[in-house]
Amino acid sequence: MWFANFFIAGSITMVLPFLSLYIEGLGDFSSSFVQTWSGWVFGITFVTAFIFSPIWGRIGDQYGRKKILIFSATGLAVSVLLMGFVTSVWQLFLLRLFMGIFTGFIPMSQALISTQTPKHIAGQVLGTLQTGSITGSLLGPMLGGLIADRIGYATTFQFVSITVAVSAVIVYFGIAEQRIEKEDQEEKTSYETKEVLLHIVKHPVLLMVMFISLTVQIAHFSIQPILSLFVGELHGPENLALFSGIAFSAAGLGNLMMAKQWGKIADRKGYVKILVFLLFMAGAVYLPAAFVTDIWQLVILRFLLGVSIGGIIPVRTAFIRQEAPVAMQGEVLGYNTSVRFLGNIIGPAMGGMISGAFGFSAVFFITSGILILSGFLLLLTMQKTSTEFRREQSYSH
């Protein structure tokens, strides 16, 4: 599964660095047209992904996740292959929209591995799995840029579709899924959507963790569209693509180094406690970025941000693994993925609007505030729930 995630993440991120350049080559367009459509073409994938994630999660719970993973990788491969043949921006836009239907491969793989893993080591195992997609995401943009310079943008899309298809082959031949219907006597073997939603609402900490999935994505993505512009302001125009790439990748490197470690620590100390700590840490690291005067200061802060954000995904998934009965896990993780994709849509739009109105520094201030507030809310929910639990225990005794 690690290798399948590596190929998927690497392939999908390969085309991101030159997506706007590809649009530019489809006609004689003004720069504002290209910028606007780059945003739409990039973002539209998350809209369909937002709608389809819980649906795939539910189907996975009922019929097994391996089939969904093969279907998802095949759909992605076909979408990317067709992108190499487009002749207009509209065609590219519609294909990116279509591609969103199949975009939940990595979260679905987390659901598969999470149900096959004993609860007490879920954090460590999911952290290890996450390093596969992070490694792919780090190498993808660099390789994509190199390949596109050699063989052209359209041919790169066709090449990428082959590496996506490799993931489907890996899952088909390399994975034996053990169907686990339930883990204790009280659990059912299937749940209706209404029951799944009620389960989430009745567990305040679980609901709060899902809300944090939204705020973390908003925070993480608010800076993405303006990062290269900010790097340009700090460093000047020479080798801008290279230095933007370094600033982007620094977060991925921190993420890669610590994802497994945070999972391991959270297995011992408790998932919610570590989530609260990581949210405060991420908020504290975002703030000084508003005051940097040199590119290397930004790179160091991006690395530290990766260290903190890196633990949030595996720890959050391990917590859901603990809180949701096994027969509804895929659907619960599907809702969690939906909420994340919603953050991917809101974040870039919010970051662009704030930086346009108040400058780059304001984005760092607001993002830092969002993360620290999320940490406080999770801490309060955790304390309130444990107080209520203790009260119930004393009544029952």
Image: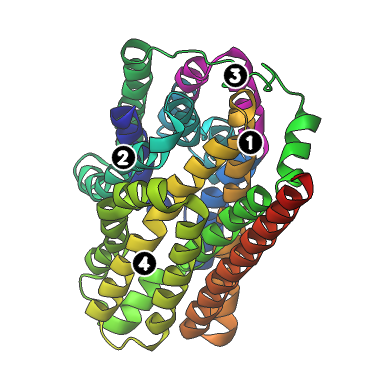
Coloration mode: rainbow
| Residue 189 pos. (x, y %) | 66, 16
| Residue 95 pos. (x, y %) | 54, 35
Judge the density around disc 3: few (<14), some (14-19), many (≥20) Cα neighbours within 10 Å. Answer: some
Q: Earlier in the sequence, mark 4 or mark 1?
A: 4
From the viewer's perspective, tell me whether residue 203 is left or right of residue 103.
Answer: right
Q: Report which residue position mark 1 lands on.
A: 332
Q: Report which residue position mark 2 lands on.
A: 128
Which amino acid is tagged 1?
Answer: Val
Say whether residue 97 is visible: no
Look at 53% across and 36% down and name the residue there.
Answer: 321
Residues drawn in magenta: 51-72
Q: Report which residue position mark 3 lands on.
A: 182
Q: Which mark is residue 305?
A: 4
| Residue 395 pos. (x, y %) | 79, 50
202, above or below 55, in the image: below
